[in-house]
Image (spheres, rainbow, N blue to C red):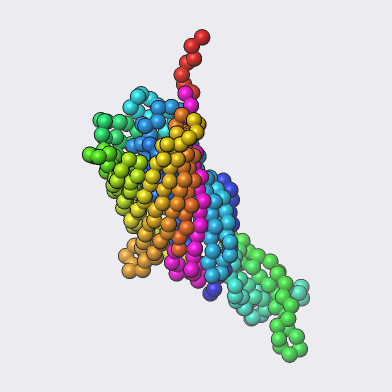
Amino acid sequence: MKKYIYIIFINLILSQSSSLSLYGLGEVINSSDAAGLSLGDSKLFSNNSILLSSPSTYHNNKQASLAMTMTFNDLNTNYINNLKSNNFNYVSFGFPITNNQYFMISLKPVLRSMMRIDEDEFTFLGSDLSHLDTNGDGDPDPVKYKSSYNFKGGMSEISASVSSKITDNFSLGLKFGKLFGTFTRKDTLNFYTVNFNNNGEQINSTWFGGEPRQNKLNYSSYSYHLDGRLQLKSDNTLAFYYGESDRLKIDAQYDNFDSVIYSIKGYQEYGLGFKSYIYSGFGYIIESQTYNAFNCKDIINIFNKPSLDMNSINYGIFYKDSNVRNININSINYSVGFYDKMYTFDDSEISLSDFGFTFGLGLEYLNNNYFNFALQFGQRLSEFEEFSNEKYYRLTFSIISKNNWFIKESE
């Protein structure tokens, strides 16, 4: 039965919707920092001394800071034109503990799926099968029906991070997070009258009523993240990250039924990257990323599609121009990159490719504040007809503002 998909957006810590939203618990959100995104969607490197997605860099900040990331999305397919949204993807506040340690609290979305689905074709019930009386004569009448589905919600993470400079060449970052959120699924069976003319042809049809059903999934778990970086000779850097979550508790609440508690395997992610300078201010990065999704195939899937695991190779080139003739601007950062992602099903030979390019520009200004933006565009394969030839464009802004908030002023 063919279905048409309509995407709904809400502008509050919500993700972009795409074909990835139709798998498992929804689309994974990675846009924490425009500076890393501009380098081929890197999670470990940027052209700044601080990267919001990498806690091992936070200790480079010697002041209290506020940070925020916002993304504008545009998606096109053969069936969908100019699907747009804008949303906040990250917000944080941090401050130094010592000269070599930093503490950060952050909030960001982890998974999201926001959409409406309408069946395109009707199913007919004759008067011998129908129990509905549409004309008030006391006898059952023929009807036709089709279903509509609404999905909204997802999962967010609130976390606390500590960054430590262990030696002059080695630093570590540790993040502990709480995963929470609610996903609501509502399906409505809509009935319509069926009328015929003298030739037996169907004529006007009107909506007669609907039978809505709704269930909610409440998520709860804890997440852990460790990343580190080692400074090598010639100012090169080797970095890694590893993250995972506990088993995810899902409290499924159904209309007119008792709630059911599920427990599913948590996610796991890890990556390794290398950053090298060719000469002062100019260099490149290469990075490998792996994400093993929540194992929810037996619990809740929108289209009975399991969660998607992801493997990617990310490349980027950067240049920092420190010779700026403006006393308020310390440097201008230029970045370009590309990535090749492969999404796979668990225990399946099916895979979906996602290839894209990134460009970015950043300003370091007024005593090491940062403003960065990144333009990302790519093309993703999809097994859903509505998302065939899926092309997406994203414009991401990040700002890190610093100040000496906790210093006592002399009288």
Above or below: residue 275 compared with residue 310: above
The x and y percentages for residue 284 are 33, 48
Is residue 390 highlighted in magenta? yes
Nearer to the camera, 282 or 130: 282
Magenta-drawn stretch, dominant element (helix, strand or loop) = strand
Query: In the image, residue 88 lies at what x, y percent?
Result: 53, 45
Whether residue 258 is visible here, answered yes or no, is no
Tell me which residue sits at (30%, 31%) in the image: 165
Query: Is residue 77 part of the magenta span, yes or no?
Result: no
* Res. 353 visible in picture: yes
Residue plotted at (40% across, 31% down): 61
Query: What residue is at 63 percent from the left and 72 percent from the top?
Result: 145
Q: Position of residue 1 (x, y in %)?
A: 53, 74
Q: Is residue 199 above or below residue 66?
A: below
Taking the view exactly as shown, the residue that stands out farthest to the left is 233
- Horizontal relation, residue 165 to residue 354: left or right: left
Q: Nearer the viewer, residue 10 or 392?
A: 392
Q: Residue at x 29, y 39 (%)?
A: 228
Which of the two residues, 218 or 64, is positioned nearer the viewer here?
A: 64
Residue 192 occupies quadrant: bottom right
**280 relative position to 233: left or right:** right
Callout count: 0
Q: Which residues are magenta?
A: 380-404
Image location of residue 243, percent across then percent down: 33, 45
